[in-house]
Amino acid sequence: KYGTFKGLKPDGIGTIIEPPAQGKVSWRNIEVILESKNSVKDMVKQAATYARCSLLSNLRRFFALAICLNFTSLEVYFFVFHHSG
């Protein structure tokens, strides 16, 4: 349950503030997106979707950070998504 983008739920999130008791966190408050997939292609697509939600919810944000894990090869990827692409 992240903001108004219903149906989108990352595998994990990182925030600076303490999450509210009811468990809903706005995309505006998400600082880091955590995702795990078995395919790098799927990982990039999913992380980019979440990054777009994060960037659109806070127009003052310059970039969105995603940390992704390929659980078949145990490789970790760091992605930085910027407004300019």
Image (tube, grey):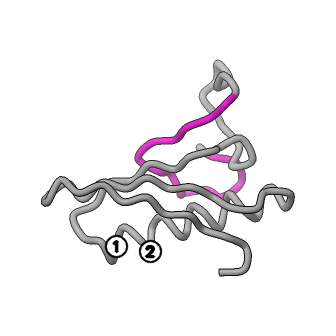
Question: Is 71 displayed left or right of 35 in the figure?
Answer: left
Disc 2 element: helix
* Residue at the extreme bottom: 85
Pointer 1 residue: 42
Residue at horizontal 53 percent and vertical 57 percent from the top: 8
Inspect the image, locate mark 2, and give the three-letter code of the amino acid beneath it: Lys
Pointer 2 residue: 45
Image height of 57 relative to 41, above or below: above
Residue at horizontal 24 percent and vertical 59 percent from the top: 70
Residue at horizontal 71 percent and vertical 43 percent from the top: 26
Q: Which residues are magenta?
A: 2-16
Question: Residue 15 at x, y = what percent?
Answer: 62, 35
Disc 1 element: helix
**Main secondary structure type of the part rendered in magenta:** loop
- Name the quarter where the N terminus is drawn: top right
Is residue 12 magenta-colored?
yes
Image height of 16 relative to 70, above or below: above
Would you call the spot at circle 2 few (<14 residues within 10 Å), some (14-19), or many (20 or more)?
few
Q: Quadrant of residue 83?
A: bottom right
Would you call the spot at circle 1 few (<14 residues within 10 Å), some (14-19), or many (20 or more)?
few
- Name the quarter where the C terminus is drawn: bottom right
Inspect the image, locate mark 1, and give the three-letter code of the amino acid beneath it: Asp
* Residue at the extreme top: 21
Question: Residue 22 at x, y = what percent?
Answer: 64, 24
| 4, 40: nearer the viewer | 40
Which numbered dot is residue 78? none
